[in-house]
């Protein structure tokens, strides 16, 4: 029978195998459990197995689950990552609750998040979402705008720039899968040669995490492989 525990163990094995193949330490890849559309109880069950980082896509749903699971808080506490599409009229709920945002792609949103970050909390850790496929309507800053955005974000007091994130068009070809991930890594290296100190590459999901780990992912975002198939609410970022 497939249970949260068997999925968890299988996923840990996949990660370890990929790390071995890449010649990397298994703890060099952080697992973000993408819990969009899942219940607080499903999150509690994974937390009980040892999962600490959870990622959410929709602001209302994130705020509601965050607040539910904060009373009483789980021990050790959850680290919350917001990975969904950002809208400027909904940044406050994120600034007041999240530890990380992976989907930052515009200066205006960065300025709002920084200004709305409560002074009592540490700076919000952010990744810039990069659109490498240039498909119409896709979220993410284009490669040509990354350096300018990174320079501006690095100067905002409420934010701490940690890295880059990408969400490539799905493909089943393992060689094709690696291309955008290698591209993101090179972009990170370029930014670091130009004065940044980015330590995070947020890339890889249930179907392409091996390719991402081979190309240097430091954080993979996994939903279905951990929780089972989603019945609604697919990729929205
Ligand atoms: C839903 C989602 C994921 C997880 O996708 P799975 O294929 O379920 O692992 C990762 N990243 C983002 C931005 C998502 O929206």
Image (tube, rainbow, N blue to C red):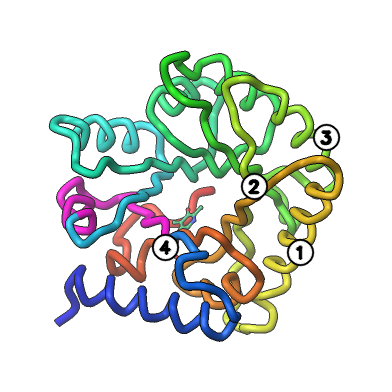
Say which residue label 1 marks. 183
Q: Which element carries disc 2, helix, strand or loop?
A: strand
Q: Which residue is mark 3?
A: 148
Q: CA distance from mark 3 to mark 4?
A: 30 Å
In the image, the segment drawn in magenta is 31-47
Residue ID for mark 4:
222
Asked if the stretch drawn in magenta spans residue 69, the answer is no
The residue singled out by tag 2 in the image is 163
Q: CA distance from mark 2 to mark 4?
A: 18 Å
Which quadrant holds the N terminus? Answer: bottom left
Which is more N-terminal, label 4 or label 1?
1
Tell me the quarter of the picture where residue 208 sits: bottom right
Marks 3 and 1, the one that precedes in the sequence:
3
Nearer mark to the viewer, of 1 and 2: 2
Residue 139 visible here: no
Q: Secondary structure at mark 4?
A: strand
Task: Give the secondary structure at mark 1.
Answer: helix
Mark 1 C-beta to ligand 1 under 8 Å: no
């Amino acid at each position: 029978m497939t249970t949260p525990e068997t999925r968890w163990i299988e996923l840990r094995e996949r990660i370890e195998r990929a790390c071995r193949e890449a010649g990397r330490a298994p703890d060099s890849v952080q697992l973000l459990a993408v819990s969009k559309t899942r219940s607080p109880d499903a999150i509690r069950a994974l937390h009980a197995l040892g999962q600490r980082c959870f990622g959410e896509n929709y602001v209302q749903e994130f705020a509601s689950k965050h607040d539910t699971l904060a009373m009483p808080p789980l021990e050790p506490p959850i680290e919350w990552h917001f990975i969904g599409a950002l809208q400027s009229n909904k940044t406050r709920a994120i600034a007041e609750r999240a530890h990380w945002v992976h989907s930052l792609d515009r200066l205006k949103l960065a300025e709002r998040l920084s200004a709305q970050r409560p002074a009592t909390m540490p700076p919000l850790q952010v990744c810039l979402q990069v659109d490498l496929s240039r498909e119409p309507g896709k979220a993410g800053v284009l490669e040509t705008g990354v350096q300018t955005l990174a320079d501006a974000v690095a100067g905002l007091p409420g934010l701490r720039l940690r890295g880059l994130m990408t969400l490539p068009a799905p493909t089943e070809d393992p060689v094709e899968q690696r291309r955008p991930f290698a591209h993101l890594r090179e972009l990170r290296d370029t930014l670091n040669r130009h004065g940044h100190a980015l330590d995070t590459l947020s890339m890889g999901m249930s179907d392409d995490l091996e390719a991402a780990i081979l190309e240097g992912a430091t954080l993979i975002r996994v939903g279905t492989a951990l929780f089972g198939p989603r019945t609604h609410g697919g990729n929205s970022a």
